[in-house]
Amino acid sequence: VSLQHGWKLEFIQSSPAITGTFEIDRPVSWTNLDIPSAKTNTGTARYSTEINLPDTKADSWILDLGDVRESARVYVNSKYAGTLWAVPFRIDIGQMLKPGKNLIEVEVTNLPANRIADMDRSQIKWRIFKNANMARLNGEKSDYSSWGTIPSGLNSNVFLIPVKYN
């Protein structure tokens, strides 16, 4: 079952701060949104959607988040289901679903690469130690101003997969 419509996105922790709730219809990298600071932020954003559980004979249901950058905490009907930090980004949520309407929330935390690159481009001092922050092998201070934007968040369709045990 494809969950590709009716999504919302809200940044719950972000540097730089991004406020508001965004209607995004389907899960996409937040760096693709028409929000300039989303391309340079580090933080956590909550993707949420309400679904009606299909009337399908299933022993359980697997939530498949697809391409996640970089880790995700999953909540079903406001209850914590688990944290996903490696492929495949899948979790069994069957015991948490109820007949009818269900709320799926996914809090995705990205890597700080986009923020670090922006701070170097803006010449913002962010290194707090003299020699311990990401130095090159030869000991020279690294510069990340040339890094491109790295995708962040949910980057593909999300699926609910019925499971039948024999």
Image (cartoon, rainbow, N blue to C red):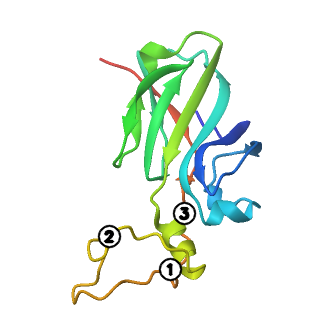
Q: CA distance from mark 3 to mark 2?
A: 28 Å
- Mark 2 belongs to which amino acid? Phe
Q: CA distance from mark 1 to mark 2?
A: 22 Å
Q: Position of residue 99 (x, y in %)?
A: 60, 9
Q: Quadrant of residue 94?
A: top left
Q: Quadrant of residue 21?
A: top right
Which quadrant is the N terminus positioned in?
A: top right
Q: Decide if residue 26 is on the left or right side of residue 165.
A: right
Q: Position of residue 133 (x, y in %)?
A: 32, 71
Q: Nearer the viewer, mark 3 or mark 2?
A: 2
Numbered circle sitting on residue 129: 2
Instruction: Identify the residue at the far top of this view.
Output: 99
Q: Residue at x 31, y 76 (%)?
A: 130
Q: Which residue is mark 3?
A: 151
Q: Position of residue 7 (x, y in %)?
A: 70, 38
161 or 33: nearer the viewer: 33
Considering the numbered disc 3 on the image, is that residue within a helix, a strand or a loop? Answer: loop
Q: Which residue is mark 1?
A: 147
Which quadrant is the C terminus positioned in?
A: top left
Q: Residue at x 53, y 66 (%)?
A: 115
18 or 10: nearer the viewer: 18
- Mark 3 belongs to which amino acid? Pro
> Where 109 sits versus 37, above or below?
above
Neighbourhood count class around disc 3 (C-alpha, 10 Å): few under 14, some 14–19, many 20 upward? many
